[in-house]
Amino acid sequence: MFGEVISFIKDKFGTNDFIPLHAPVFAGNERAYVMDTLDSTFVSSVGAYVEQAEIMMAEICQTQRAVAVVNGTSGLQIAMQLAGVKLGDEVLTQALTFVATANAIQYIGAEAVFLDVDCDTMGLSAKAVAEFLEEFGEKRENGTHNKKTGKKIAACIPMHTFGFPVHLDALMAICTEWNIPLIEDAAESLGSYYRGKHTGSFGQLGVISFNGNKIVTCGGGGMIVTQNEELGKLGKHLTTTAKVPHPYEYVHDQVGYNFRMPNLNAALICAQLEQLEAFLANKRVLANEYAVFFESQGIKFRTELEDTQANYWLMCVELENLEERNAFLKATNEAKTMTRPIWQLMYRLPMYKHCYRDAQKNAEFLEERIVNIPSSVRQ
Ligand SMILES: *Cc1c(COP(=O)(O)O)cnc(C)c1O
């Protein structure tokens, strides 16, 4: 079974060796920039590449500010703090996500509320959020509260699954109506656009990841993006130990974090970002070829929705049911063609079992059917 799928993928990657899901490509100025940091000795918390990476990201995302951080998870944590999320608050998000989204909420001491996703985007459903708020939301002077738990609903964090943008217009309208800050977990969606605007730039804050398996990488790293200059400034301050500028004294005006991106990693991401457009075009070619092929096989291949441009970070197919999914995973992995199911829903994990969740009809449907297939940039 799935012999034709396996041959097609092997042919696309021109090899019979193991084909990973997503391998990084270092084909540009990576070596030159990294060597430059070594030659200058500025490998750590000071150096020109950090600022350069922030300028490049603000330009790509068309935001007022971009703040480089040590990884996407820390970026989410700080974004929540900037948005005013506090100990004991509730944060609305999806259960169909990578664990980092839920972990970051936990680091703040807030509680995740898992709401369903839309089947078409695989991201947080505006309808699910609206229904939850109509049932439990209570508008108070200092923001919306959950009238059942008494807790403040302090943020809403949709995630753009595999780089497919959520329905941002609808989500933003609901968050505005209920006065709830929107933070986009755009960790997977660098290079993805919704109605011509970059994902991550719609919410009060957005967070992008440069982990090793993302569309561009610097080993580990992330970026907080925002249209709010003040929040950007404060984000930079908080992630760099809250140090007040002084020629030699140690002055810190609040509890800050050492979440800064080292210059060594920033050098790498600058070189990677220079190639982003080429990577996006390269992946789009593969996505188009997959779309035609899977159509011929009667297998659903996920393509971008109207009004959006997906980055095709991790491409995926939707199998008919759990049995077919399992057969697909087994056949492809045995043939050294890596495929992987979408994440287990967060409330299946021991530490998030107790969290509130709605019916999760779509999330559970997708959990049983979505499988990622090899999606690397081809050289
Ligand atoms: C990768 C990822 C993160 C976290 O990024 P790191 O840089 O690995 O910390 C957060 N959310 C989602 C959805 C991700 O895929």
Image: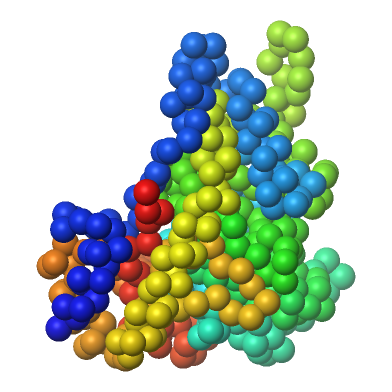
Q: How is the image coloured?
A: rainbow
Q: Is residue 356 left or right of residue 5?
A: right
Rendered location of residue 234, percent (x, y): 75, 40
Tell me which corner region of the image, top left, top right, bottom left or bottom right, holds residue 138: bottom right
Rendered location of residue 366, percent (x, y): 41, 83
| Closer to the camera in the image, 149 or 244 | 244
Tell me which corner region of the image, top left, top right, bottom left or bottom right, holds residue 192: bottom right
**The N terminus, quarter of image:** bottom left
Residue drawn where x is 61% and y is 27% of the image: 49
Rendered location of residue 76, percent (x, y): 58, 53
| Closer to the camera in the image, 343 or 252 | 343
Asked if residue 11 is positioned above or below residue 31 in the image, the reply reads: below
Rendered location of residue 312, percent (x, y): 48, 65
Residue drawn where x is 81% and y is 73% of the image: 176
Residue drawn where x is 55% and y is 75% of the image: 304
Is residue 266 at least partly visible in the picture? yes
Q: Is residue 362 left or right of residue 342?
A: right
Q: Residue furthest top?
A: 248
Is residue 74 at least partly visible in the picture? no
Residue drawn where x is 35% and y is 69% of the image: 372
Q: Residue furthest right?
A: 141
Total label count?
A: 0
Asked if residue 358 is positioned above or below residue 207 in the image, the reply reads: below
Asked if residue 116 is positioned above or below residue 179 in the image, the reply reads: below
Q: Is residue 137 left or right of residue 223?
A: right
